[in-house]
Amino acid sequence: MNRAIQRTQILTGHLLSSSPSQSSPLSQKPCLNYSPPELTENYEFDLGEMRKLLDGHNLEDRDWLFGLMLQSPLFNPRERGGKVFVLPDYNQSMEQQREMTLKRIQYLAERGVFTGWLTSRGIESELRMLAFIDVLAIFDHSLFLKLVVHFLGWGSAIKFSGTKIHHDKWLRDTENYVIKGCFAMSELGHGSNVRGIETVTTYDPKREEFVISTPCESGQKYWIGGAANHATHTVVFSQLNINGSNQGVHAFIAQIRDAGNLCPNIRIADCGHKIGLNGVDNGRIWFDNVRIPRENLLNSVADVTPDGKYLSAIKDPDQRFAAFLAPLTSGRVTIASCAVYQSKIGLAIAIRYSLTRRAFSVTPNGPEVLLLDYPSHQRRLLPLLAKTYAMSFAANYLKMIYVKRTPESNKTIHVVSCAFKAVLTWHNTRTLQECREACGGQGLKTENRVGHLKAEYDVQSTLEGDNNVLMQQVSKALLAQYIAARKRNKPFQGLGLEHMNRPCPVIPSQLTSSVLRCSQLQTNAFCLRERDLLNRFAAEVSQHQTKGENKENAFLLSYQLAEDLGRAFSDRSIFQTFIEAEETVCDLPLKNVLGLLRSMYVLICMEEDVAFLRYGYLSTNNAAAVRKEVTKLCSELRPHALGLVSSLGIPDAFLSPIAFNWVDANSWSSVKN
Amino acid sequence: MGSLSLRLVSSRDQEEQEVVVEEKSSSFVRILTLNRPKQLNALSLQMICRLWDLFLAYEQDPNVKIVILKGKGRAFCAGGDVASVVRDINQGKWRSGAEFFRKEYMLNFVMATYRKPQVSILNGIVMGGGAGASIHGRFRVATENSVFAMPETALGLFPDVGASYYLSRLPGFFGEYVGLTGTRLDGAEMLACGLATHFVPSARLSMLEAALCKVNSTDPAIISAIIDEYSQQPNIKERSAYRRLDVIDRCFSRRTVEDILYSLEREVIDKEDEWISATIESLKKASPTSLKISLRSIREGRLQGVGQCLVREYRMVYHVLQGEVSKDFSEGCRAILIDKDKKPKWEPSNLELISDSMVDMYFSKVNDEEFEDLKLPARSNLPVSAIAKL
């Protein structure tokens, strides 16, 4: 009843405010006014509580860092439409952008932002670091990446692959940004396949030194962030050759610059201008028999004695290799989380714009209609918003299992981080494209962010692992679980596959609206798909094998099912994180809107993935019911749109002028200023 | 807030005149004078209600183009009349205290989003609630007599009245400095940091007023040009805090109050600096709880619209009045306003005893059935400058 009265009041308010008022000095002008959505839209849930749920951790720290950037001229504050926005000047040359990124990092270091990033241990300090990384990426991807390379590439390699001698020597200076590190792993000829890299290191027992060399052009280190201009040191990934026998990939420390000059036997070239990320100085490195002390082998898993004997606690070269790749996991965690924040920026801008921009009237001489009041526009943006909410919970879950990692959970973290990194970054690429289009021509302006972010973040789908390769690893891991469970006739355990032990769920033949919104049905639909696809995938692989294909090849030939399965696993895992987040909420209005978002997330996944129809999890009638329900959910989410984008944890200054008073931001007086 | 008096208002008539309205014939200007000079024009609930009525009426009245707000005597306004609030708290009626703040913040919001230019003549003390009644307006005219301060942390409160909005938007981390230390700024400093829009020598104020009374426009550019004619560029005194922006930025940008204090102390390790020592002193005298919630309030406010700031501050002040975590507000008022021994006994007594979750309490939803969040008044047809503050 209260709600009805409230709604009537809102409608009355709409009608009254749209009639021209005599006292308004602007009403005589036949010109569009910008009407802030805050004055007409209302919030039915507590924005602060929702933000807490989405950001998940360290909100106060985040706000501090936002403020730190906002209050410094280094972050290029500009006033548009009466508000201040911070955004790098992307019209600067590549060299200038790199210098600015460096200056920003130095400023942040002086203010203590990086304190404890490497020298503290424990969940609390890691979570704070992850929160700060989210915030830095909200300002600029170059800033994020240059720091991720330095702290999570170089820094983590020393911290996790090195031992006390390395920690004592490098960590403090790295944290204070006195030493600037980079991470030389990928080569011109080898990216995702790290084991195939060609850089080779030998040991010289006479001088107790390692000798690193680039044997051929395809072995040059490539895309090394920080190498072109600023880095003083690098971690070098290289084959280790001891007395003619190859011990596999190991990590070494080499100094590449001293007082601004290149070190002897190091050649460096610039990777040049890129489609985005020009604030990062990516470079290429050639090592011409570079000599480094024996201690510069990061020796937590393997060591070479002074007289040249190879020692390793881990006998299995696969496991040894995996240990060296550990820093990549933290990179994937941050990339996944930051991808979600970029989707949030895009959606906040596009949805705010669609709440203030009108186009066409539906009645003769009637007022033009708000973009977001078009059902088609809702259908473009609101499902993406629901997915972004779901992925926000997924990213938080990933961060939590990462900071609470144990040797036992490493495998889960690896699989989940691969899946989420791929799915969340793909979602971001797609969302930014839709948001750019939803803003029309305004989306093209760099200052409006959405369009430009597409280029800035395009790299995320191949960075720290090509998404397609990562997803193959996911389906491979699932298959391994399947084979292990079947072979030993044991129940499934881990990766959320326990549902495989239960009876196969059944989808009712008639899906009504209330059934579709029920979390049990939603769980069943996702589990049914994953279960069936895993069975099919395992059967197909084994079929190929019986025809004489080897295991690898059988797997490659089954790539279509592998892709479907990877998606099914990811969607179901993300869904579970949503359910878990929802369960922590008691507040009724918040719970209601989360329920709508969750249903939207599931139903849009069901609508988009043809597997549901292809394999008959949904009848054609049921597929039609799903599609209809999506439209209905769009109209139910529409009244919450402003509240939902206002809870995303992106301060106004980090959005863009079209998200606010775009009329004034484009006025003649703003041209004159 | 920050009234220095406990005197009771005696009669209804006097209440009516606590805000004097001047309306010159054939003028589009209304001059409102805060008229409780003995109390340094501290805002009573009645004054707030009167201002509320007048401001809303003038906004609708096509015959009003400019609203001038000034104070009688040596103060513009020394704050909200918290004496009555403290009296209520001490009698267990803290909810009526909350009512005072609710009305005051609503007025602050109307001023911040006002459709017509408000010109505040700040010829004297401007503190706490007095700042809230002026800084949100379009024009703030400082003089050689201006004394600005947000002294709440010394009283066990926090800079409220929308201060988390305007302090956080001062250059660099000057807002943190002003809000945490409660330092006093003169007119020149107010102009330099943006709290004031103009500096007019007090001798020229009557001429300025007369000139404004001839204006028949709400155009801020026209009004600004008129005030410009009487303005001066004042000199910032040699020992002004505004000349120490580098230190302020370095230290007050730190993440926590403890870090801020630590960095200030480090600045004076090997060289003496009177100003820094005084700054440290004022932080050490303030309520530790107040410092922590004030810092967080300013930091959150930096990222929020003025309405959100006021809604949040209202929650905060309600928690302060409830006194669940700390009763420093009562204690501060006792020590500064009532007993005047100037020796408050803060509880918790130092920063280390205040956990993050205790600070969180002040920002959380209020657990009281009678509590309602601040409902901001509906606004429409806002000027560009007001839209930008939402």
Image (spheres, rainbow, N blue to C red):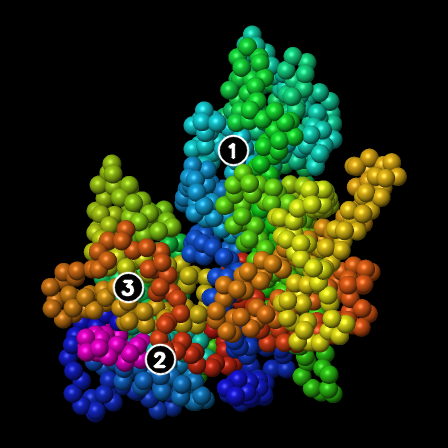
**Residue type highlighted by circle 2:** Glu
> Is A371 positioned to the left or the right of A115 in the image?
right
The answer to if B124 sits in the magenta stretch is no
**Residue type highlighted by circle 3:** Val
A645 is higher (above) or lower (below) than B93 = above
User: Quick one: label 3 or label 2, which is nearer the N terminus?
Assistant: 3
Q: How many marks?
A: 3
> Is B353 positioned to the left or the right of A116 in the image?
left
Marks 3, 2 in one chain: yes
Magenta segment boundaries in residue numbering: B76-101
Q: Nearer the viewer, residue A647 or A609?
A: A609
What element does badge 2 sit on? Answer: loop
Q: Nearer the viewer, residue B196 or A97?
A: A97
The residue singled out by tag 1 in the image is A160
Residue at x-position 45% and y-position 57%: A59
The residue singled out by tag 2 in the image is B370
Chain letter behind tag 1: A
Q: Is residue A655 visible?
A: no
Give the percent coordinates (x, y) of residue B349: 21, 56
**Residue type highlighted by circle 1:** Phe
Say few, some or many: other residues with alpha carbon within 10 Å of mark 1 (under 14 / 14 to 19 / 20 or more).
Answer: some
The residue singled out by tag 3 in the image is B325
Chain letter behind tag 2: B
Q: Which mark is residue A313?
A: none
Q: Is residue B96 visible?
A: yes
Label 3 – label 2 distance at C-alpha = 19 Å
Say few, some or many: other residues with alpha carbon within 10 Å of mark 3 (under 14 / 14 to 19 / 20 or more).
Answer: some
The answer to if B89 sits in the magenta stretch is yes
Q: Main secondary structure of the magenta part?
A: helix
